[in-house]
Amino acid sequence: MKQTRSLLIVILFSLLVFAPGITRIPLIDHDSAVFAQASKQMAERQSPWQTKIQDKTQNNKQPGVHWLQASAVKWLSPNHLNAPWPYRLPSLLGALLAVLLTFAFAKKYFTLRTATISALLLASSILLIVEAHLATTAAMLLGIIVLMQGALWRLYQPPSADQNNLPWLLTFWGAMAAGIFISPVAPIFAFATIAFLCSWDRSWHCLKIIKLPFGLLFLFAIIAVWMHAFNLSFHARDFFPKFTHSIPPGFYFILLPLTLWPGVLFFWHGAIHAWQQRSQPAIRFCIAWIVPSWILFALTPIKLPQMLLPVYPAIVMLIAHAIEHFDTASSPRWGRFLMSFMTIVWAVVSFGLIWLMVLVPYYLTREVCIAHTLISSALMILTGIILQYKAHKPMRSVLLMSLASFLLLAPTLQFRVPQLKALWLSHQVSEIIHSRMPHAISEQNPLITTLNPEASLQFELGPDKLKFRPIALAGNQFKTDKPQLYLLPYKHLERLKAAAEHAHLKWQPLAKLSGVYYSKGKLLELSLVRIG
């Protein structure tokens, strides 16, 4: 009965934090819009082996998420392919899968209380909530990696007399294969864990239990079929993503107080307790899950916040186990110092988030939402309660932190973020065209933009109804048989106007739009005009 009640609480809470805003928030550039637009074209053209943006091949993107997104939109919204929510559904389901598998494996190898706490902490973390709202790979990859690591965990346990490991062996390699279809980094977490355990145990037992020759043959067979079909479709040779981000080591640790908020409050409790109890097999496996992957990704020049999300389930399990068993008085002096320091950092991040949720909407809209201010005030009160109970009643702290995360993020995502029109320039352009001039653009008469068109604008209008033309050429190729719409930065308006007047064409400004060009990190003013 307790297990059923705990599971229902976890599912309900997860949906309460993952679902708000899913259907209301427009697509976010850059990655989310790129994935959605490529999946949309895959659904329209019914070409599962072709991942394209307009006519440009995305041959370094794994097709797994595109298959899921294209399937979701064809099943749930076949007549409205421009609706953004079906493209987010795989991310929401991936996040929910990760939380439920964390609960299941923590219950298996720890206790029901540890399982409940770890699931709530994972579901309430800012990074996972954000990823659940993006039409990208991170949340679904997380769910698959938790399944893969959970199967490896089961294989690593000492076998019982009647234990049949074949289902778990197939689950491990099957999840790894599925993960590769989402992202090529998936096997890194498993093999890093295995190498660490072999080194720690001074034994090859971990390699033996996964039946490495069989598994690699299974993987290569699946990947070979995919790459052959992919290559026939694209005549391409680039199968893996190319990144240009380069950030020094320490990035993930510095960002942790934000990405794992609010559960990061007990991070050092979990770390110190894990080291003290490292002889326990379950604790040892969680450490092996976290440490080598963290080191590997920290040493690579490519760093994105979501790349270490797959180790978060192990972190929250160690935190939850510490909350249940840890005695602060037994920790060394340096440990108590780190806990106190993290409390200060956590308080700064918490109050910073509160003011961020109030000031950013005000900066973009010059409006203050009274309801949101009240919610932020309530969160301040909850923060004080959390700090009051932190030392003596950590279980109550976890419940209050989960409530705080819900009160801050759910109303923000459901009500405030969709109202921030300055963030959704592409959506504003689409609304103006569809409401005022529904037939003004077509494949034969596309919207001309002097900006490099973002994927979100292609998603909103359709890639065949959008054409890029540099400002130097925009004024030299006017159509004379019918009016044409132009979208350009406001600073280029006079230049285009002079070219239109020189060509003796009518000029009609339609709208001036201001917003944040967040993929470039700058403010932008756009003009929508009709010429001809």
Image (cartoon, rainbow, N blue to C red):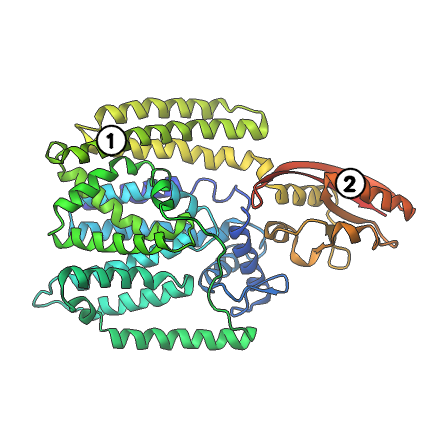
**Total numbered labels:** 2
Q: Is residue 113 visible?
A: no
**Residue type pointed to by label 1:** Ser
Q: Percent position (x, y) of residue 293?
A: 30, 55
Is residue 363 shown above or below 292? above
Determine the CA span between mark 1 and mark 2.
Answer: 56 Å
Disc sitting over residue 493 in the figure: 2
Q: Percent position (x, y) of residue 386?
A: 27, 27
Judged from the image, the secondary structure of the residue bearing numbered disc 2 is helix
Please state which of residues 386 and 298 is positioned toward the viewer in this rendering. Answer: 298
Residue that carries the numbered disc 1 in the rendered image: 397
Of badges 1 and 2, nearer the viewer stands 2
Is residue 184 found left or right of 36 in the rendered image? left
What is the quadrant of the N terminus in the image? top left
Please state which of residues 141 and 193 is positioned toward the viewer in this rendering. Answer: 193
Is residue 307 shown above or below 522? below
* Image quadrant where residue 126 sits: top left
Q: Going from the N terminus, do you reach mark 1 or mark 2 first?
A: 1
